[in-house]
Amino acid sequence: MRVIVVGAGVVGTLHAWHAVERGHEVVQIEREAEARGASLRNFGQIWVSGRAGGEELETALRARELWESIGARVPGIGFRANGSLTPVRGEHELAVAEAAVARPDAAARGYKLLTAGEALAVNPALRGTYDAALYCERDAAVEPRVAQLALREELLKSPRYTFLPGREVRDVVGEHAVRDDHGDVHHGDVVVLCTGAWLGGLVRELAGPELPVRRVRLQMMQTEPLGEPLTTSVADADSFRYYPAYRGDALDLLNSGQPQAETAAAHRMQLLMVQRADGGLTIGDTHEYEHPFAFDTVEEPYEHLTGVVESFLGRPLPKIRRRWAGVYAQCTDTGRVVHRQRVRDGVWLVTGPGGRGMTCSPAIAETTADELGW
């Protein structure tokens, strides 16, 4: 079988990976020299802890297994099974953490409720003030700015894989073929469009104007090296308000009894933090849903995040090295893991994983391969 994959972000690259692994010939087409969208502008978290029970959690757990096995073959992706800690303060935050460890799927996630002393033993960099911490053993991380490059280096070892950068697909030609902006036509047995947040142009023509996917903008930042290991990923209790695993009576009481800080609420924020391979910290994030998006970044969210992080670390944050904004595609029905649609005979659109993209992409691609009979 010959598979044409359009898009070289993490979702597209994992589709190419599964196709090559199953013995198929793959042509992967990318409009940029390399992908530059949300696949690079994220935390690199393999985030199991907050996923909704059922299909979403099952997808995340399967993806976690796949990331670990791929990481063993491709060390350059920077896979590490670092787990996560969410420090909590006060009775309302603690109650949400207690409800989490009481979930029937808590063991599958690796949830444990730790005292402040136990959390400090797990992550000695968290020397600030907090009462307890929710630990999730199944969370992990990769290096988002280099993961796709490392995967492609491995794919290029196969004579069945071809990468064509700097080509924008403009048209679907008959069945199973696309034409790029160089005028070249690429024929295959199946075409998979993994175009990320690029939802206009050809995608709109093929899927129609009512595509149930929206674009979401976020702001993030990265610091100079911390100077010591941050042994786990770190979240704050605002992540309880964001992730579906924590919904319930305890969260309702948190929202009513301990409202979110004004800046965090205005920018729909949570703290997520991961240490990069060079020792720096990737810190975020915000969520903007209303179009048109702003073209600039604003300082208030960064100031809020700096204060939260310093309160957990018990020390000043290292100098900020870079700040950025990104945009990802998310299903408007946020209970869906991804939008997978046949838009022409032999042509499929796979988009809209939202913030699950880096976590779930290996399992999303595996499901596509299974459903299409690769």
Image (cartoon, rainbow, N blue to C red):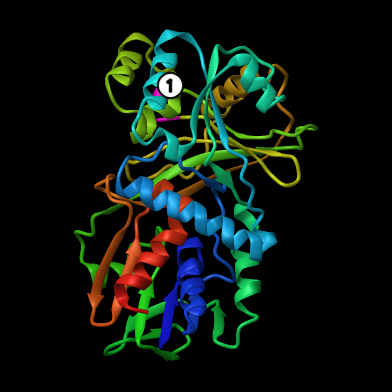
Give yes or no for residue 303 being in the magenta stretch. no
Q: Which residue is drawn at 72% across and 47% down?
A: 277
Label 1: state its secondary structure. Answer: helix
**Residue placed farthest to the right in the image?**
227
Q: Is residue 172 placed above or below 130 in the rendered structure?
A: below
Q: Is residue 185 placed above or below 238 in the rendered structure?
A: below
Q: Name the residue under label 1.
A: 97
Where's the C terminus, which quadrant?
bottom left
Q: Residue at x 51, y 76 (%)?
A: 21
Front-lying residue, 201 or 368: 368
Q: Which residue is drawn at 54% across and 70% down?
A: 32
From the viewer's perspective, tell me whether residue 201 is left or right of residue 146: left
Give yes or no for residue 267 being in the magenta stretch. yes
From the viewer's perspective, tell me whether residue 361 is left or right of residue 149: left
Instruction: Residue 233: give x, y in percent of width and height.
Output: 59, 35
From the viewer's perspective, tell me whether residue 268 is left or right of residue 129: left
Q: Residue at x 34, y 71 (%)?
A: 370
**Label 1 environment density (alpha carbons within 10 Å; few <14, some 14–19, many ≥20):** many
Front-lying residue, 55 or 241: 55
Range of residues picked out in magenta: 263-269
Tell me the quarter of the picture where residue 102 sits.
Answer: top left
Q: How many labels does the image show?
A: 1
Residue type at tag 1: Ala
Instruction: Residue 222: give x, y in percent of width and height.
Output: 65, 39
Instruction: Determine if residue 195 is in view.
Output: no
From the viewer's perspective, tell me whether residue 336 is left or right of residue 123: left
Where's the N terminus, which quadrant?
bottom left
Instruction: Residue 364: give x, y in percent of width and height.
Output: 39, 61
Instruction: Residue 50: give x, y in percent of width and height.
Output: 41, 36
Instruction: Determine if residue 354 is in view.
Output: yes
